Image: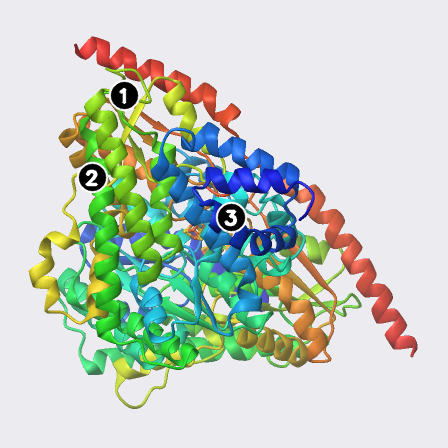
Amino acid sequence: MFEGVEAYRELLTTCDFSPEEIDNELPRLKKAFDKAGLTVEDVKRCRERMITYFEADTLRGARMALGLHIRAFVDMVMAGEEHDVRIYGHLPLMAGHCVLGAAELARPDAYIGLPDLICHMVLGAFFNKLDPLLEASEAWCLPAGLAHCGCSQAKIGGRLTDVVPPATLHVSAGNYCDEAPKVDEVLAYHFKEPVVWCNRCQDESFDDPPMDDRHLKYFSANIRRTKDAISEAVGAEVTNQMIMQTMMATEEVGKEFKRIQDYRAESDPSPISVVTTDMAAALVGIDMTPRGLSKVAEMMKVLADEVQDRVERGVGVVPKGAPRVMYAYVLPFASPAVGKAFEEAGLNVCVREGYGSMPIWSRREEIAKLDPCDIVAGIFLHNPTLVKPRWRADVVVLGYNKAKLDGIVMLPHYSCRVFGTDFPMMRDMVRKELGDIPITVLETDVFDPRYYTAEQARTRIESFSEMVRAAKASAA
Amino acid sequence: MVLDTMQRLTAYLRNRPVELKHIKDSGEKKIVAHFVGDYLPVEIIHAAGAVPLGLVHGGDPEAVEAAHRAILRYLCPFSRAQFGYWVLGEQSYYSLFDLLVAPITCQHLRRAADLYNVHTDVPIFRLGVPQPYDGEQGAQYFSEGLEFLKQRVEELTGNKVTEAKLRESIALYARMRDLLRQISELRKSPRPPITTTEFIKLNHAAHIADPNFMVELLDTLYQELRDKEGPERTGPRILITGPNIALGDYKVLDLIEECGGTVVVEDIAEGVIFYWENVATDGDPMAALVDRYIRRRPVNCSFMRPTMDQHFDFIIKLADDFSVDGIVWYQLRMCETWSIESFFLADRMKARDASLPMLKLDSEYDVADRGPLRTRIETFIETLEGRTLACSKV
Ligand code: SF4
Ligand code: SF4
């Protein structure tokens, strides 16, 4: 055995590994952690953070979720040794998860994963040790000070430091921002690793309905091309049926997650921390294969049952009667303390942007007749958060009214021309509809903990909390 | 003579806002503005009898600052300024148009269009610009977009864009591009008869002026310049590359000249990219537009992907054709895609046995930039001068 083995064992116990699993997994895990430069001290700190921020001491579902993240990290680091074929999706992979995940059915021995998000969750949120990756990319082609997003920096840093092994194929999200697909071009240009770009043109009208046939066709053709490239890379066809099967697996997770979201939206006091909820939800993006999704669904069910139990017992993470606020759209992965700071300031961050909007699956019968690539395209183009600010603002207003909220927190992600720049416009549009309600636009960084810490954010969060309370009191 | 022609242009441009205001107020024609970047076939707008107006202004820190009320700072200063000028209300071109056409190129200009949607009553038309990677399917998408644009400007003006009218407009703009290229190539001479700043100003004017006026002026200018030699220049010859050099953003060009360099060619949207390739004047006119603007571009801007191979080879060829001694990469702060590309050009040159010194600069349109920029440019020119001298001794 190795020095500090007890710390590793404790960490894995905290992550709901059984004693047999610990014995089996320990050598692999140690090797992967060593490769990533994680020390015994890091392991100890990681465990503490899991308890401080993610309720690992009180919720088994949270522990299971943390364990799935850790397993995904080890699988990713070891993929270079363990798999001949490695297909990576990249953030922001907002479409085509199901296509990517379905590759597992075509080629069960291939590694399929989303290294960016895995690194952000495990190295960033849990270990607080993303800096070496960020710094490696800053010293190379993504210098500091020019607003290259931490997401892209970690991607390049992961390859430069060999934490992420070379890929057989990168699936690039050309459907959203400019930064990510351009950085993926670097993977092709410099690292000589093939990339398929899944593009869309963002020329939808600002005001009219979300999509028309033309946008759908163009995007779904891109998804089809992505599917073909994946088939070629895995050496077996990814069929429509496989995609449908993967979609169904995603839906199973979605059902359990919706239970948690509903409890959060409807219960007072709030039964689970927003930070824990987001950490568990991130797994849908991390392991999108049917095999992985079935484990995520199992975890989500345990977590949802525990949340239900808390609701029935009246247990909450913030005091009963706390002001209720919506957050739009992502809390910083890298600094879970920011999410916690809202709760520490006495706010119930109970719904996320998108709450109350019609889930695409409510149109299931209509959709079932379509080709799966059209469905994937349709799901994306029907998601207000991902398509255009006017629609986002409408959905925020809808959610605000439906959940009877007291305020809205908008979290522009520094350096993201998409997620960052929408918010001032959305604030102005929401104010036109709802009047002078408490809204804060709090700039943070989802991925890079160096620029915006919880301490910096805390003062603004506390002022916002006071503003919400005052508005609530005067309304009463 | 040359001076007269350039002065004639200056006088024309000084009066252009008044002329456009008159056109607008009298209802004589509609004014259709557009974001520049060379992804919009202005020929369609012209063929509909509207006045195409390229929004080419920039370089003004106040316009950037004015946009901050509505947008966060991590858009590039050019795109922030495109909305900031409207907020300030001091730049007449930005309050004159009846329709704004926004080719959806990079996210920054897309956001500038969104800002007009949220804060103004200006109607916006978005033109989808496919990635080069999307091949024929992308070209088809673009072609459909052009049909929609045609319908939109027809509705606006009440005029039909007939095939004959479109051919005429294509021929007019083709002539303009040919003339710009002819004038541009005069700078291959050791004693260029026109400076690059003057030349870029011609390109800016091409986005604002009436194209008939512009063609006549460029023709005159070309006749005047073709056999003329400029002053003797001993400093290094520079290629400037970057996303754009806006009307008003002449700081870097001026500093290079002040420090003794001669910019002999520009790889920018309001330069080479605009005039290097032309639209075919025969065949189906709409197909010819798709061909030129999507398939047969001299180079794709860096917000596209993949572009690096094509872009670098184009720069290397241009540098060779214009006998360049050094490259100034001038990008705008927060323009992420140009920033990424800049890192790889030097390696590419090495691989192509064409190593040229390169200076990378970026700007936020800030007045405080000037001092540090001057120091860096001076050092670069000195290095180049040393190199040129050493080469000439060999
Ligand atoms: S953070 Fe924004 S800019 Fe960066 S990859 Fe994600 S969507 Fe793109
Ligand atoms: S400078 Fe860059 S970011 Fe700005 S408009 Fe041009 S391409 Fe877009």
Q: Position of residue B303 (x, y in %)?
A: 46, 62
Are the residues under marks 1 and 2 on the same chain?
Answer: yes
Question: Looking at the image, is A99 positioned above or below residue A354?
Answer: below
The answer for how far apart the CA atoms under marks 1 and 3 are is 32 Å
Q: Position of residue A182 (x, y in %)?
A: 49, 62
Which residue is at a point 53% across and 71% down the rendered structure image? A188
Query: On the picture, is A304 further left or further right than B362?
Result: left
> Residue A315 bears which disc, if any?
1
Q: Circle 3 sits on which residue?
A: A22
The residue furthest front is A20
Query: Tag 2 or tag 1, which sits nearer the N-term?
Result: 2
Q: Amino acid at mark 3?
A: Ile
> Residue A259 bears which disc, if any?
2
Residue at mark 2: chain: A
Residue at mark 1: chain: A
Q: Is residue A449 something that shows in the picture?
A: no
Q: Which of the two discs, 1 and 2, sits closer to the camera?
A: 1
Secondary structure under the numbered disc 3 in the rendered image: helix
